[in-house]
Image (spheres, grey):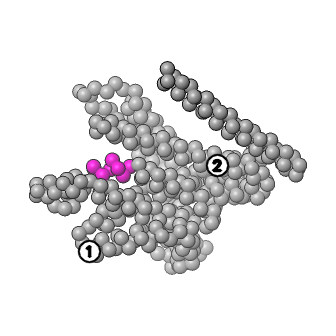
Amino acid sequence: MKRNTSAYSDLVMQLVVICIIAACLVLLAINLADNLEERSIRSGFGFLWHSAGFEISQTLIPFSPKDSYAAALLSGLFNTIIVAIIAIVLATLFGALIGIAALSRNPSVCIFARTYIEWVRNIPLLVQLYVWYAVFTQMMPSYQQAHKLLPHVYLDSTGLHFPVIQNMHSTGFISILIGIIAIYIYRFTQKRHENKRPISIQSVLLLTASFTFISWTIYSSSFNPPKLTNFGFKGGGVLLPEFLAMLLGLTIYNAAFIAEIFRAGVLSVPAGQREAGSALGLSYNIVILKIVIPQAMILIRPPLSNQYLNIVKNTSLAMAIGYPDLMSIANTIINQTGQAVEIIALTMGIYFALSLLITTFLNHRNKKILQNMGR
């Protein structure tokens, strides 16, 4: 009886709190609507389908000033996603390397890693972005003296120029996308048995899509390297200085935090594990890579997920150096339309959705890994 009473009281309290929050939101909405009407400020999201009237310096999807504000926001969203994904991958790899180096028995390597961590993580990210932007725009040579990094790859003050594949039909991308979707559908719908090895089916699907993609790339595309002319590089692809500065800033800054996460995770493994590995005659590096790190990953993954969320949210600082991410384009739209409430609400919702997707995916992966380990 007491349990039922307690559960009923908890339910009533939750309903009261929900009602209070809902009432506050309604009052805020009414007050906002009255203030907008009093100042003759338009409201609503109909403006999203009007012509944007501005250009975006670098986009993954075709965009022109005649396209709508919604298309501009979509272009900014893709720019945010691509720089965040690449920064997450690079920061994870570089951070893991620095974290392991901080545990090295070599004093020089350990001191270098610890110095890097302490210096980088204590300098604000915005300052680092300004520094990298100055490096790529002010310290790089003009296109006449461009640095040749690799064959057909050049770096100058206008960005990183590289060869691209032109006229590649969309069928290749569609085929590999279908292959990936088929793999995940099979993975999550199949019945799992001990005598089944689903990896073989997945490999067949992935190889089929990959061969289709490669064949279409070879037979329906052409290689287009950048060529130096009197007016700069012509042809090929280019990554603008803003993108490079944003990518390096996010990677180097977050790698310092990820390095500490890896170092703490490795140190959390009992010393007896390392001693057992040494007793078997394994070298220190093999013990760390094969014995310690796999166990440490259990504790590393949760804080690593939080760091990935920080990378996504920190992309909003791109506005300071002119990279056309979601926040930068949203600010441009606010300046043109004056409908700040709608744009800010939309931007907040997009960032929230991105963070929620990342959190859901990582939590699902962590749960699967723990289940496979029998925990």
The residue wearing badge 1 is 107
Answer whether residue 296 is magenta in the image: yes
Q: Examine the rendered structure and indicate whether residue 68 appears above or below residue 6.
A: below
Q: Point out residue 327 in the picture as x, y percentages from the top left corner.
A: 64, 56
Observer-nearest of 92 and 222: 92
Do tag 1 and tag 2 residues touch (Cβ < 8 Å)? no
* Location of the C terminus (image quadrant): top left
Q: Main secondary structure of the magenta part?
A: helix
Residue 203 located left or right of residue 335: left
Total marks placed: 2
The residue wearing badge 2 is 348
- The amino acid type of the residue labelled 1 equals Pro
Residue 217 located left or right of residue 131: left
- The amino acid type of the residue labelled 2 equals Met
The residue sitting at 44% across, 73% down in the picture is 119
Residue 136: tell me if it is visible: no
Q: Point out residue 250 in the picture as x, y percentages from the top left corner.
A: 50, 62
The residue sitting at 33% across, 55% down in the picture is 265
Residue 150: tell me if it is visible: yes
The residue sitting at 81% across, 45% down in the picture is 31
Q: Tag 1, which secondary structure?
A: helix
- Spatial distance from mark 1 to mark 2, Cα to Cα? 46 Å
Region rendered in magenta = 293-301
User: What label does residue 67 carry, if any?
Assistant: none
Q: Point out residue 222 in the picture as x, y percentages from the top left corner.
A: 48, 54
For residue 44, which quarter of the picture? Answer: top right
Q: Tag 2, which secondary structure?
A: helix
Answer whether residue 146 is magenta in the image: no
Q: Point out residue 74 in the picture as x, y percentages from the top left corner.
A: 63, 48
